[in-house]
Structures are given as structure tokens and as C-alpha cells.
Image (cartoon, coloured by chain):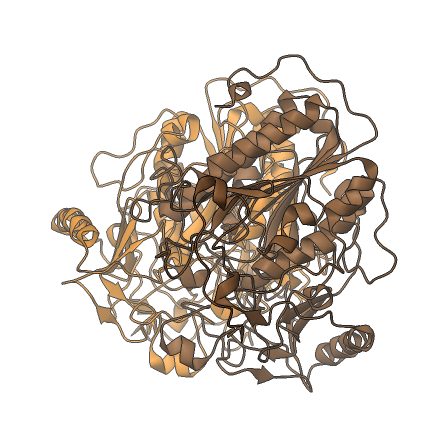
Chain colours: A orange, B brown
Amino acid sequence: MHSYMRTPGTEKQEEMAHYANVVIAHTTEICKWNVIISFCNLNVRPLTCLSFLYSPARAALLTGRLPIRNGFYTTNAHARNAYTPQEIVGGISKEEILLPEILKKRGYVSKIVGKWHLGHREQYLPLERGFDQWFGSPNCHFGPYNTSYRPNIPVYNNSEMIGRYYEEFEIDERTGESNLTQIYLQEGLDFIFQQTLARQPFFLYWAPDATHAPVYASKHFLGKSQRGRYGDAVMELDYSVGQILAWLVTLGIDKNTFVFFTSDNGAALMSGPKQSGSNGPFLCGKETTFEGGMREPAIAWWPGHIPAGTVSYQLGSVMDLFTTSLTLAGLAAPFDRVIDGLDLTPSLFNNSMTDRPIFYYRGNQMMAVRVGPYKAHYWTWSNSWEEFNKGINFCPGQEVTGVTTHTQQEHTMQPLIIHLGRDPGEKYPISVLSKEYQTVLSRVTLIVEEHQKTLVPGQPQLNMCDLAVMNWAPPGCERLGKCLKPPQSQPWKCDWPH
Amino acid sequence: MHSYMRTPGTEKQEEMAHYANVVIAHTTEICKWNVIISFCNLNVRPLTCLSFLYSPARAALLTGRLPIRNGFYTTNAHARNAYTPQEIVGGISKEEILLPEILKKRGYVSKIVGKWHLGHREQYLPLERGFDQWFGSPNCHFGPYNTSYRPNIPVYNNSEMIGRYYEEFEIDERTGESNLTQIYLQEGLDFIFQQTLARQPFFLYWAPDATHAPVYASKHFLGKSQRGRYGDAVMELDYSVGQILAWLVTLGIDKNTFVFFTSDNGAALMSGPKQSGSNGPFLCGKETTFEGGMREPAIAWWPGHIPAGTVSYQLGSVMDLFTTSLTLAGLAAPFDRVIDGLDLTPSLFNNSMTDRPIFYYRGNQMMAVRVGPYKAHYWTWSNSWEEFNKGINFCPGQEVTGVTTHTQQEHTMQPLIIHLGRDPGEKYPISVLSKEYQTVLSRVTLIVEEHQKTLVPGQPQLNMCDLAVMNWAPPGCERLGKCLKPPQSQPWKCDWPH
């Protein structure tokens, strides 16, 4: 299909001077352990990166701002996770400035391959928000659906749909076979090739849908890992990132291309045992503000610029990719708003360290804050007893009394403080009677007060749902004869159970 | 003190042909995560290695045999862990053949540096059991003791004590400062240097006491890690192994020296939060037969022989170090007894795989068996309710119903079967109604029946205790004026609570 994969050009392209291409590979719920192992002999610097939850993580990455600022949260109930299922009415606000919009000023061509997740209605789609190209889908690959009640998710090529998951883009629920990651890989490689030929600096936001449940892999990878279907998917992802790196080398643009690999949240332990990764030593998983939900492996690659095989202890965040990418392109971040993202280039190039707090939110509630090696929990919650009793468990096999609480537990007068160095599993809150507690609390209190004093929450975008807004008739459906008839509009306040 | 450390010889020694030196660095309770990261750019092959518990692990390493065969277990109560505190009467049986005894046939000079733990009475000490040299102690560095009731543990140089822990060999309980790892490092480097000068093939069994609680580090490392005192100790251990490798390179014998690094059991979670490591995704810790207690990181190093940076999926065991070392020395294992250790050289050199079962014992009870990616639990037990209610917890923050049981739970008629690939945390036993369960059970049953049919348990060595046998007056004490008066002999059946 893409013959350049079989006959790579042997002539090395001249280096494209001045510009640093940017490739951000941003996936979901990868197995922390496997990936670090797989990559540890490349020219990479692994570091710790904090993320948010699915859609809010993606909004944070592209705006450089906390979801509470950019509006990617809900206020429907206290401390609820929200995202963009296809009944969501909202999307990323027009008020927000996205990374590709700014990169355009310096001639960057931007493409997103894979999952968008920032609103599927027309005004929210990638090409409306600064991307020049898109191949992928607006929502997650859940399904298949009975299309009289719920449409399957469309796959777009730029601004028109070209098919739907479980229809033209097959995912075999029974065997777990799907070529999706291969398709996304080829789209990424193709884009890199075209931009290299055109000598255009580029930004590739490679956002494959793997390893999110329902977990899939292509035929070649199915059954190949020792970690079940989930492991097969990780293996294919690993292979694919490897292909992207190798392709950059083949095209001679490796020394001009900054590549960053990370995830949007910790492993979804509630998908276990067959569809979930592992959060290693960290507590709980996706949907929580414990480290298992928020901490991600992150790998930076740039031969000649980033020293190989070193480990950074810098506390990063997906928001930093916004600021860092702008720095690499010689651009400034917007001055008219708060930007939370940090420029990571000093850490990446010189392994220097910047002390910075990170705030962990669930909905509009600040649940915890990280300051240096300490984390202070102001609220704890895994999920409700009601959900838990139905078998939905975000912390399977784990129970830390007073920490993994099934009621929303307030600790604002006396936060639980953890030293994440000594206690990465968040099992042993520091005694409130200790001198250490008092010292840390004073420092954290100042930081939290400053944060809360200056915080101006954005307009919440994830409050309203409506079956009429689902992907019934996306642009391009007529040409394919794949338009479905939407029901009458009946908006309601979305129910976010956890 | 050791001036060669400051002025390393610049002339490369000629290669010592024919022989492969062997260095086994065998420590306790290391943090799995840190070490793998630290080592991943060296010329190493990490693999999975199963171990046993402290003393039985060491007995297994040096005999190549399961503790149930070599006698390093107890029958005082059902399924109890036993080791060699200083009131133990027994030690490694004279019937057993130890690795250095066989290596001697090929002219190897063997030294143990650090913890012996195979019996502290004179007839059991290293120089009685094939080692040519010893610098270290017979027991763990617990203390300090009120020496009218209990002597501090002696440190030996060969067959005579030269001081005691907390006396001549300082460990500051309050600050955690101790030079022990540095002392053991220097002893190791010194031995390597002397053997290189003498052109003698050597076996160094470098068994530092770190990172066992009470955790210590030398001044230079204290406070240096981001992981508290435990992290400081890991850092010093990492540094020390690095020094050993660098020294082999400096002396020009790196291409003649096989180095293997592993541990005797998983992190001792009950020492948490300040004195314990993390078992990452694995269940529970030391004292249990869950993976957190038994699975170890293991790293093999041999430039020019072991391909750098690869990962082996071979299931190893500490017993394999016996067989593998003999193969490297061109020697055969004893024919007159069952040897459980596997020759790992095909895995190390060619990354080939051998399917082999591993039996997990607690005392004389086979608790579980590992066959391929499957583990079948025939008995489960964390520890008794009585201990647990006193705050002794081998699985802090973890609770898997029906798995981490506080009563000794028998499953022999219907073992709990886990797929460790899909479920590394042992949280989801496979449904007994599934086809997979039935297929695996048939296979496992045959293997277990064969094992049990042919098993001849060794005479248990860890049943009797006596305060009179403690380290009151070790050889050499007279010269130091450090002999203490033993009480009257009153042997009793040791109480092994878990």
C-alpha cells in the first residue's frame, strides 16, 4: 500500500535547518512496565509525567492549561470525571488557543492521527481548531452498536467521514483482531514522508486508540505477547513507535525531530483482568487521583539533543508538551491567559530540575496537590459504594484504609500527606503529629492558597448531553450513503457517576 | 586504605584463558524498579528469577537444590518460613555439596563477602564448606543487643571473628549511617585484584547485607536518593555493583568474568514505609509465596558473551546459578542427587527458552507451582489473624479475596490458577468452569504428581533452637577479648510464627 515502507529512500535528505519537527505520540492506558523496558536502549530520556483523565488530558495537552481553566470538566455533581462520549453537547471552547494554531505562525503543518476526543460536533473538529489534516475518529472505539439506537463512531479523513468503526473499520470483538493501529501507523509515516519531501516543518499528534478497551491488535501481533491481548496491543504500539523512529532516521530527519511518547491516564484497572494494564507500584488506576490514575511513563527522543539512556526526575505534565513544543519552534505561549505548562527543554537537554506544583482535579474539585516529593490529598474518593457493589472497582486487590475511600472524604483542614519517594504506593500518610507534616503542610498551604486565589475556572463544557448530537450524520455521510436519522433533541444534564 | 582504587593499573592484564570467573552479587529485598532502571544501559540481560526466602534461598543458590531437598526448612508446624537466627542449632548439612567445593576441582579460589546465613556454629561456617576466604557475618545485622542477653553478630575475616556489628562495625540506628556496604565493596575489589594478579580463576559470592532492615547507607549516600533511607541504600548498592564492573574492566578481565546480580526474596513490605522496597505490580512481599515474595530482578553481565540490553523471558531460579556456574567452569553437577538448577547459558548467550516448572514451598508444604505463564496455588496464606491483628502485614494496602488469606487455605482439590502474564498481580484466578482452567490443571497435575512421587525430603535442619549456641564466643574472640559467657544449653523446638 505504501511502497516506501518496503523500499526506503537511500539518499539521506538534507537536514531541514532551523525547525524542530514535533511528534507527540499520546496513547491511553499503556502498561508502564513493558514500555519502559522496550525503550530503554533507544536514544531516550524517560521521565515522570502527570496526566489527567482521557478528554481533559487531551485538552490540557493542546492548550497547556489545567482542565479547570480550559473548561474541560463538569459541575453537574461534586468531583466527577467527565469526557466526550458521543452524546456530549460540548467540546473544546473557541476561547482556547490550541498548539497547532500557534505553530502555524512558523509554517508548521499539523496533523492529528487517531483519537480527537475534544468534541465531535462540527465546530469542534480538528480542522476547525488549527490542524491541517486529520485521520481518525472523534470518540473512542466503543461498540459495536445497534445503529437504530446509537451510531457507530465515524472515522474521518480530514473533514469528512470515510467509514465507521465495526463497519468499514473492522474490530473483531471475539478475536480482538483489528488493523487500526497499523492504519494509524501508516497514516503517520505517510504524513512524515510528505512533509519531508515538501521540506515543511511539521507537528504530528499521533494519538492511536490502543491500548484502550476493547483491546485489539492486528493479526501479526495477536497471541505474540506473554501478557494476553492487552500485551499484544502494547507490543504493536511499541513496534509502531519504533517504526516511526526508524522512519525518521531513514528520511534523515531524526536530528530535526523531537519525539515525545506518553499516555493520557494510568491503566484502567476496572477493565481487568483481560483488558487492563498494570500501574506497577502505584495505587489504583484510571478514574482516580491516586498515582495509578495520574502518573505516566514518558519518553523523549531526539538524537543529538537529548542524551541517550538518562532518566530525568523532573516532574512533568502533559500540559508541558504545549509549552515545550512552542519553545522548540521558537514561539511564545499566549500572554493573555494563565499557561500551566512548563518548558521542559532544560530538563530534556541538560537534565536540570524545576520545582513546580501540580494540582490534581476531579471535575471542579481540587483533590490533591503535588509539591516536590510530597502529595497532599484534600479529598479522597475511589468510587461510590453503589458502583463498587455493582463490581466496578478502580483499585482491584487494593485497599488502604482512609485513603481509597468509597465515600467522598474531605481532608481540607488536615490533608493526608504522602512522601511519594518513600511511599510510592500511597499507603502510609505521614503522621500529623510529626515535624515533617507541619513543615510540608505550611509549604503546601501557601501554594494551594495562591492557586485558589488566582484561579478563574473556565466555562464548564461537559455538562450537557443530548442523543440528537450523536454521530448520526457526520459530514461526508451522504457520499457514503451512511447517514442515520437523529432523534429529536432532548438535552439533559449528563450523569457522571464517578 | 586500598590504594589501587585511586591508582588503577593502566596495563591491561592478559586474558586468563579457559576459565570464566564468576561473580554472584546476591542481596536482599532490593527495590525492583530502581535497579532495573539503573542497569539498563549496561551490557546486561535482565531476566526474571524466582527465589526462596532468605536462608533457604542461599542454601538453594549454593546447592542447586530446592530447600525441601537440601534440608533448609522446618517441620515444627505447617507451612512455616524458617531461617538462621543465632539461636538456631542447625546449618547446611554436611551431606550437601556446595558450589565452591566443586569449583575447587578446576582451581577456582572462592570467597564469600557478606552474609552467610547457612548456620553460624563452627562446623557450618564458609571455610568448612568449600570457601577459601570469607569476610562477613554468619547472621543478619539485627541489633544492637544488650549483650548480657544476646550477643551482637560477629564479623569474620576467614575463620576468626574480628569484631561485632554495632561495636567495631558501626551501624548508627538513629541516622542510618554505616560503612558496611563500602567495607564489603572494598573486600570484593581487593579479592578480584589479588586473584587477577595471581592469575587464578575465582568465584566471588558478594552477598552484602543491604538493603535488609535496619536499612543503612554510608555518609556519602545518606539523603541522596528520592526514596528515603531505603533508596539511599539501593543507590549505594547500585554504585557498588558499578564499581565491581568497572574494576573488572580496568583489570582487563571483564571478558573473562560472568557477573550475575539478584536477590534472595522480594521486598519486605512489613518493614514499610521507611525500611521497605516495592514489589511493583506483584502481590504481597517477603514471607509469602505470592509473586511479590518470590520474584526477583536478575541481571547478567558478561561483555562479549551476553548481548547487551536484551531481556530474557526465561524463568530462572537462584538454584540455576549453581548449575550455570558449573557449566561456565567446565564442570558437571553431582550425579548422585537431584539437582533442580537449570543451566542458563543457552538463555544468556542465545536468548533461548526452556520450559521448566518451579515449586514454591513454605516449610515442607508445596504452596504453589509455576508452569509456563501459569501459577497454581495449592495453599494460600499471608499470615495468621493473630499476627495480622498485631500489625504484622505482608501485603499492606492489598487484599485479594480468597487469595491473600489469613487462614491457611487448602486448594489442593481445586487449585487457584493464575495467568501471570495477563494477571501479574494475582488478582483474578481463572474460572474453574473455563476450558483454559481444565487444560492447565491437567498439565499442572501431572507435573505436581511427578514431583511429589519422586521427592525425597532432606533432613530438616531448622527445627531446633538453643540460646547456648548463639554467637557468644566465636573463634578469635579470645584474641580480641570479646568472648561472652553462654547460658546453659536448653534446646527447644523453634517457634516459626509464619
Task: Name the residue rendered at 70%, 52% in the picture.
Answer: B62
From this view, report whether residue B286 is shown above or below residue A45.
below
From this view, report whether residue B374 is shown above or below residue A419.
below
Task: Name the residue rendered at 78%, 62% in the picture.
Answer: B356
Q: Quadrant of residue A164?
A: bottom right
Q: Is residue A360 left or right of residue B358?
A: left
Task: Name the residue rendered at 39%, 39% in the picture.
Answer: A313
- Residue A421, given in percent of the width and then of the height, sits at 36, 49
- Residue A51, given in percent of the width and then of the height, sits at 38, 51
Q: Quadrant of residue A425?
A: bottom left
- Residue B154, given in percent of the width and then of the height, sits at 48, 48
Task: Name the residue rendered at 85%, 44% in the picture.
Answer: B331
Residue lying farthest to the top in this orientation: B11
Count up the numbered dots: 0
Q: Is residue B216 left or right of residue B441?
A: left
Q: Is residue A395 left or right of residue A461?
A: right
Q: In front: A405, or B459?
A: B459
Residue A304 visible in the snapshot: yes
Residue B285 visible in the snapshot: no
Q: In front: B100, or B14?
A: B100
Q: Quadrant of residue B265?
A: bottom right
From this view, report whether residue B276 is shown above or below residue B390.
above
- Residue B45, given in percent of the width and then of the height, sits at 67, 42
